[in-house]
Amino acid sequence: MKNSIKSILIICVLFAGFNVTAQKLGHVNSQAIMQEMPDYDAARKELESYKNDLTKELEMYQKLIVEFAQDYEQNKGGMSAETRQRKETDLMERQQNYEKKAYEAENSLQQKEQQLLQQIMLKVNNAVKDLAEKEGYSYIYEVTTLLYAGGEDISDKVRKKLGIAVTAN
């Protein structure tokens, strides 16, 4: 009996030492918020313009290759074997350069998109952090990565903080 009273007393002392507080949880859909931001539309337009510029440049380069190939085909009958070989080598090099430029353009486009969207995502993340600190949230989860979203949906609060109109649900 003395041992069980002693055990209960020890357990009570241990629990008294812990500061048990409820943690405030929230979740947010930052991707949806990001797409609602005016910056997102501007970034999409800038990216589309950048893509169009790259496409025009590649099309022009490809047109020159086609013209070179057509000229070669029309005139190869009157060329020496050495000249034909040089022109064929030149044509292959031009095609390889085009493929390299197309690859570089694709990479450049991806980098531009990442750069533009990263700036917008940083604004959303900063708004979430500010809100979490001001309202005492212990954890805020990204809803798109959760199987179950417990806690408060703070998406509308983040929208307000970013100056995005909030529609009534």
Image: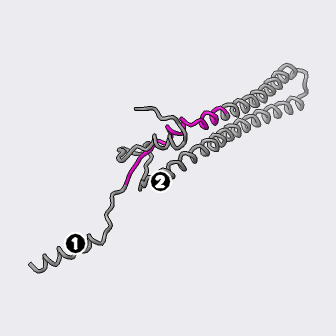
Q: Position of residue 74 (x, y in %)?
A: 85, 19
> What residue is drawn where x is 71% and y is 35%?
102
**Looking at the picture, how far across and down is residue 89, in whole percent?**
82, 34
Percent x, y for residue 108? 69, 41
| Residue at far top of view | 74
In the picture of the structure, the residue carrying the numbered disc 2 is: 134
Residue name at image x 81 percent, y 27 percent: 64
* Of residues 120 and 87, the one drawn nearer to the viewer in this rendering: 120
- The alpha-carbon separation of the residues under discs 1 and 2 comes to 34 Å
As shown in the figure, which amino acid type bears the numbered disc 1?
Cys
The quadrant of the picture occupied by the N terminus is bottom left
Of marks 1 and 2, the one in the foreground: 2
Highlighted range, magenta: 24-45
Question: In the displayed image of the protein, which residue is found farthest to the left?
Answer: 1
Given the image, on which type of amino acid does mark 2 rest?
Lys
35 within the magenta span: yes
| Residue 51 quadrant | top right
Image: 122 above or below 80:
below
**N-terminal label among 1 and 2:** 1
Residue 148 is inside the magenta segment:
no
Q: Secondary structure at mark 2?
A: helix
> In the figure, is residue 165 to the left or right of 91?
left
Quadrant of the frame with the C terminus:
top left
Quarter of the image holding residue 101? top right
Give the camera-side residue of 9 and 61. 9
Which residue is located at x 47 percent, y 55 percent? 133
Report the side of 134 relative to 97 (left or right). Answer: left
Q: Which residue is mark 1?
A: 12
